[in-house]
């Protein structure tokens, strides 16, 4: 883990912008403002991290333990609390505000969110299985997975077998996206490509942790 910067925001939606003569698909993210509410350190917690708060919260929805937590940080209560792992957590201060000017055009970022839930899905939709054949002799189960293991040995199904089940609604990270435009005044980041989750979903934009090497490096 290195010095990683990040901000929490909300996915607004997708659109396209023109860069020179090309149309570039982008996702608009309303980034911040966030407030630092807690600092995690190796001495007290066993790891280094920064806790960020984001989103408005009605006063009547604030319970006393939450109110006490934000009072200790000197901030107004917010809806979401997200931790960002970083080695330079000690350089932050509680009550510090983080805005969209954290990132600039051309920065490589990772976007973390929760993917759209698709309910109970079969193996063809969930895992991309090809299904069974469609010729004579095949039972009416063309979308089934087929065999899932041997009979006598080991007489069980191995853990992790790809089968039908709940699809989506999982924490998902898309790596090495590029910030195409930044509008700090309105708190917007335009990021090339798609990011996880529905419009209005919570996302975290952080520094890219697996930036690929340039050719010839």
Image (spheres, helix red, strand yellow):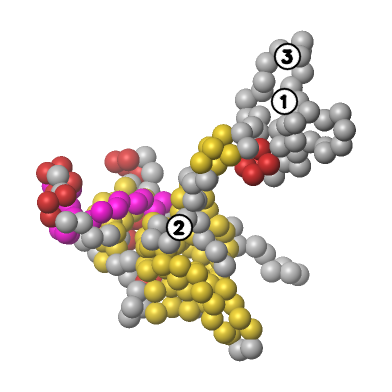
Crowdedness near tag 3: few (<14), some (14–19) or many (≥20) residues, C-alpha within 10 Å: few
Mark linked to residue 22:
none
| Highlighted magenta segment, given as a residue range | 68-85
Q: Position of residue 16 (x, y in %)?
A: 54, 77
Q: CA distance from mark 2 to mark 1?
A: 33 Å
Kindly state the secondary structure of the residue where label 2 is placed: loop
Crowdedness near tag 2: few (<14), some (14–19) or many (≥20) residues, C-alpha within 10 Å: some
Q: Is residue 43 left or right of residue 176?
A: left
- Labels 2 and 1: the sequence-earlier one: 1
Residue wearing tag 2: 198
Residue wearing tag 3: 154
Q: Who's the residue at 71% across and 37% down the image?
A: 143
Q: Is residue 72 magenta?
A: yes
Mark linked to residue 148:
1
Q: Is residue 74 left or right of residue 197?
A: left
Mark in front: 3 vs 1: 1
């Amino acid at each position: 883990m290195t010095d990683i910067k990040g901000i929490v925001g909300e996915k607004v939606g997708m659109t396209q912008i023109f860069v020179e003569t090309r149309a570039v698909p982008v996702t608009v993210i309303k980034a911040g403002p966030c407030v630092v509410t807690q600092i995690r350190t190796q001495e007290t917690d066993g790891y280094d991290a920064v806790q960020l708060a984001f989103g408005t919260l009605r006063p009547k929805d604030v319970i006393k333990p939450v109110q006490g937590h934000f009072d200790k940080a000197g901030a107004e209560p917010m809806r979401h609390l997200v931790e960002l792992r970083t080695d330079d957590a000690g350089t932050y201060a509680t009550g510090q505000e983080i805005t969209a000017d954290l990132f600039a055009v051309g920065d490589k970022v990772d976007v973390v969110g929760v993917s759209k839930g698709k309910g109970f899905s079969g193996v063809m939709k969930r895992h991309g299985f090809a299904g069974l054949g469609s010729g004579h002799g095949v039972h009416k189960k063309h979308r089934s997975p087929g065999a899932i293991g041997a009979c006598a040995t080991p007489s069980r199904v191995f853990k992790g077998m790809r089968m039908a089940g709940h699809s989506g609604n999982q924490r998902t990270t898309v790596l090495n996206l590029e910030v195409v435009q930044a509008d700090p005044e309105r708190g917007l980041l335009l990021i090339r490509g798609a990011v996880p989750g529905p419009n209005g979903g919570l996302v975290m934009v952080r520094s890219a942790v697996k930036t690929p090497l340039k050719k010839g490096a």
